[in-house]
Amino acid sequence: MPTAAVPKLIVFDLDACLKLPVSPERGETVADLVDHRQIYPGSKGRQHFPALQRETGVPFDQMLFFDDCTYGDNCGDVARSCPGVACVRTPHGLTEALFDAGLAAFARGERGVLDAGKDAVK
């Protein structure tokens, strides 16, 4: 995949995943692999993503967002408030197929709320 087609920042709003083991023999969890971690209340689109942009310097069009929210529309909020962010809904959790489909859609230049599920094998 060409470098320009790879996001500079991938945002996961998947709190439960932080405790999952990735290297049990070394005791590493997903949280150990994260460079920039925030727990941010309020609107993802009007508060959280603008704060991420200020803190990281990464433009919205270089961000890929995966969200498992089922009680609201964080992806829609981010897409409306932060033009350029690619957003993937993962209401049943993030799978390797959804992650790959999100990366592929990002590489194709798709932005806003992506229908990555259509490309993901269930």
Image: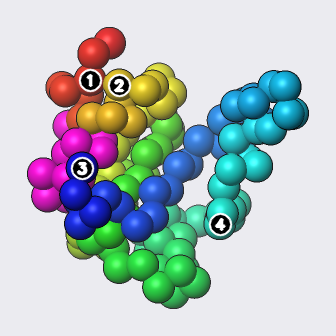
Alpha carbon distance from label 3 to label 1:
18 Å
Residue 2 visible, this orientation = yes
The circle drawn on residue 1 is 3
View extreme (top): residue: 122
- Three-letter code for the amino acid on which mark 3 is drawn: Met
The circle drawn on residue 36 is 4
Residues at circles 1 and 2 in contact by the CB criterion of under 8 Å: yes
**Mark 3 or mark 4: which comes first in sequence?**
3
Look at the image and say whether residue 33 sits in the magenta stretch: no
Q: Which residues are magenta?
A: 102-115
On screen, residue 64 versus residue 119, left or right, reads: right
The correct choice, above or below, for 73 with respect to 25 in the image is: below
Rendered residue at 59%/65% (across/down): 42
Rendered residue at 53%/75% (across/down): 52
The circle drawn on residue 120 is 1
Alpha carbon distance from label 2 to label 3:
16 Å
Residues at circles 4 and 1 in contact by the CB criterion of under 8 Å: no
Q: Secondary structure at mark 3?
A: loop
Rendered residue at 84%/25% (across/down): 25
On screen, residue 114 versus residue 122, left or right, reads: left
**Mark 4 or mark 1: which comes first in sequence?**
4
**Residues packed near mark 2 inside 10 Å, few (<14), some (14 to 19) or many (20 plus):** some
Q: Camera-side residue: 50 or 24? A: 24
On screen, residue 113 versus residue 93, left or right, reads: left
**Mark 2 or mark 3: which comes first in sequence?**
3
**Residues packed near mark 3 inside 10 Å, few (<14), some (14 to 19) or many (20 plus):** few
